[in-house]
Image (spheres, rainbow, N blue to C red):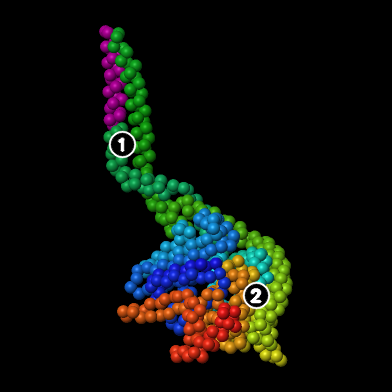
């Protein structure tokens, strides 16, 4: 349960601390006093989306903290799975700091977390019921969620969603394949042209680099030719010189045999020089005709450039494109076989979908009948004795939510057929239907705290008294917080908090205070009598507390 809520610099609340009790808590106050700010603050500390405009004017940041006691085991299990601190006494502290620049600083038991983690934990701690819930009741597309929650059908719904996603994926794949068949001939013509163009080009990896090197060489042909010729002449002269040296050493060895050892080295030198001269001559012969290849090289480079603009930046990308074209062409040739296989796959997926859809629908109908009876009992208690409630089913093609439309129908008067809730329910009736549904679903929820934000809209008199009794009853098994304008509801609270707005030094301040018995009598009298309070008003307020068992 929520034990303590601390608020700092939220809207017109400069600083406030509230200690709630384990039971039925009500918050009352004049319109505009700041009751909605309490809900905004709780939403913020639970990780819900909020606005920087919530921060009090003139402040750079705002803080909200919520201290819980006796949290449920699933909450602690979630904390452990997230590697967050778990307190041995079952307590839990949530904190959130909001900054004007949009930043958030969130903590769980002192550990820093993201807003999304804070939201995951917050969803398991509290449920806030208010105007948005009424809108969900008016939106028939949301009614299936109430039935699924009541029937514990999450597992069945998830199985249906999985089957629906598989079926939808099959259908999309089949549709794409059929559309491809329509454009197949045109596409195959294009692919044939691209394949032929790339195959004729006979592209080789690294070809452009090699051709550019050859082109560079040819453009420097005169310089190359002159250098090679110079090298050849020098090598030829060197061969002649060394050959002459060999002859001289032979003559010298006749006089001095010891110099003949030089002859071996000279023979090796002349062999190397001879090889170099011949290699240079070979290169020269190639260079002599190289300039005639320049046009062919330019044409080849131009072809490769044009192909690269269409099929890829380099030879590797162009060859990959060619392979992709071949594979797609093969697929198109076999497209009909693919379509037939996909059709079989889709038929199987549809059969499996319809099977799980029927299971879900049957379970929904069973749960809906029990929910109908439960809600009717609740409505009869809430001063709608002739109310008739119906959960209307209509079979449809499979959608994301199931194979049936579910809508709530109601009639409050005998002799009238039930009609869609959104079309016939008044504001007061809608509030009671919502409370009836929430009570019916109460045992399906692990949260320990329920918050009702002005659930009494459009209700007065006996109906208000019945709602107060029902809220008090709900608070026996869990903590209930309720913002109300009705004294019949407020009188049944275990703890009553007054929210007041004051102006000091041209600034607005909101305070929250727990009321004692005298304070409760005065506040109930104000709620009944308005500005001018008389003893009659106070006596009536005291009687409300007596009737509620508070006095």
Residue displayed at 35% across by 41% down: 288
Instruction: Give percent across and percent down for residue 141.
Output: 61, 77
Check residue 291 for magenta coloring.
no
Q: Nearer the viewer, residue 466 or 397?
A: 466
Q: Main secondary structure of the magenta part?
A: helix
Check residue 238 for magenta coloring.
yes
Q: Nearer the viewer, mark 1 or mark 2?
A: 2
Q: Nearer the viewer, residue 332 or 478?
A: 478
State which region is magenta: 233-256
Tag 2's secondary structure?
helix
Q: Nearer the viewer, residue 307 or 142?
A: 142
Residue that numbered label 2 is attached to: 440
Left or right: 366 in relation to 224: right
Q: Earlier in the sequence, mark 1 or mark 2?
A: 1
Residue displayed at 32% across by 13% down: 261
Residue that numbered label 1 is attached to: 228
């Amino acid at each position: 349960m929520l034990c303590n809520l601390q608020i700092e610099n939220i809207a017109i609340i400069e600083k406030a601390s509230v200690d709630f009790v384990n039971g039925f808590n009500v918050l009352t106050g004049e319109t505009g006093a700041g009751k909605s700010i309490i809900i905004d603050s709780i939403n913020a500390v639970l990780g819900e989306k909020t606005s920087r405009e919530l921060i009090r004017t003139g402040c750079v940041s705002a803080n909200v903290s919520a201290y819980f006691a006796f949290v449920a085991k699933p909450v602690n299990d979630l904390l452990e799975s997230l590697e967050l601190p778990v307190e041995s006494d079952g307590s839990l502290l949530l904190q959130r700091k909001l900054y004007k620049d949009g930043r958030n600083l969130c903590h769980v038991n002192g550990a820093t977390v993201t807003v999304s983690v804070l939201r995951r934990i917050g969803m398991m701690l509290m449920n806030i019921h208010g105007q948005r819930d009424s809108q969900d009741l008016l939106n028939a597309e949301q009614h299936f969620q109430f039935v699924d929650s009541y029937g514990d059908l999450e597992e069945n719904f998830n199985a249906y969603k999985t089957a629906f996603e598989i079926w939808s994926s099959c259908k999309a794949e089949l549709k794409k394949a059929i559309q491809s068949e329509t454009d197949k001939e045109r596409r195959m013509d294009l692919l044939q042209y691209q394949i032929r163009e790339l195959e004729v080009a006979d592209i080789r990896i690294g070809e452009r680099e090699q051709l550019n090197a050859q082109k560079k060489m040819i453009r420097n042909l005169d310089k190359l030719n002159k250098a090679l010729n110079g090298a050849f002449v020098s090598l030829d002269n060197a061969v002649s010189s060394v050959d002459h040296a060999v002859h001289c050493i032979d003559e010298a060895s006749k006089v001095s045999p010891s110099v003949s050892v030089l002859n071996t080295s000279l023979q090796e030198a002349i062999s190397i020089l001879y090889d170099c001269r011949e290699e240079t001559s070979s290169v020269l012969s190639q260079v002599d005709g190289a300039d005639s290849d320049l046009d062919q090289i330019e044409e080849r480079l131009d072809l490769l450039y044009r192909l690269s603009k269409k099929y890829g930046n380099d030879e590797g990308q162009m060859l990959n494109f060619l392979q992709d074209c071949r594979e797609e062409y093969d697929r198109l040739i076999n497209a009909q076989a693919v379509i037939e296989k996909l059709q079989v796959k889709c038929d199987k997926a549809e059969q499996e979908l319809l099977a799980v859809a029927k299971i879900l629908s049957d379970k929904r109908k069973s749960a809906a009948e029990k929910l109908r009876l439960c809600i009717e009992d609740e409505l009869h208690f809430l001063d709608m004795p002739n109310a008739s409630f119906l959960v209307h089913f209509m079979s449809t093609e499979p959608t994301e939510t199931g194979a049936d439309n579910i809508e709530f129908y109601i009639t409050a008067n005998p002799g009238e057929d039930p009609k869609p809730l959104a079309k016939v329910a008044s504001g007061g009736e809608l509030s009671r239907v919502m409370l009836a549904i929430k009570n019916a679903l109460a045992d399906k929820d692990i949260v320990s705290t329920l918050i009702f934000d002005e659930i009494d809209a459009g209700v007065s008199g006996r109906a208000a008294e019945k709602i107060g009794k029902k809220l008090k009853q709900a608070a026996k098994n869990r903590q209930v917080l309720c913002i109300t304008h009705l004294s019949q509801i407020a009188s049944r609270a275990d703890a009553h908090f007054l929210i007041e707005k004051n102006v000091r030094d041209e600034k607005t301040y909101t305070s929250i205070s727990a009321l004692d018995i005298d304070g409760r009598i005065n506040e109930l009298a104000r709620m009944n009598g308005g500005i001018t309070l008389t003893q009659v008003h106070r006596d009536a307020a005291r009687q409300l507390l007596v009737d509620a068992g508070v006095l």
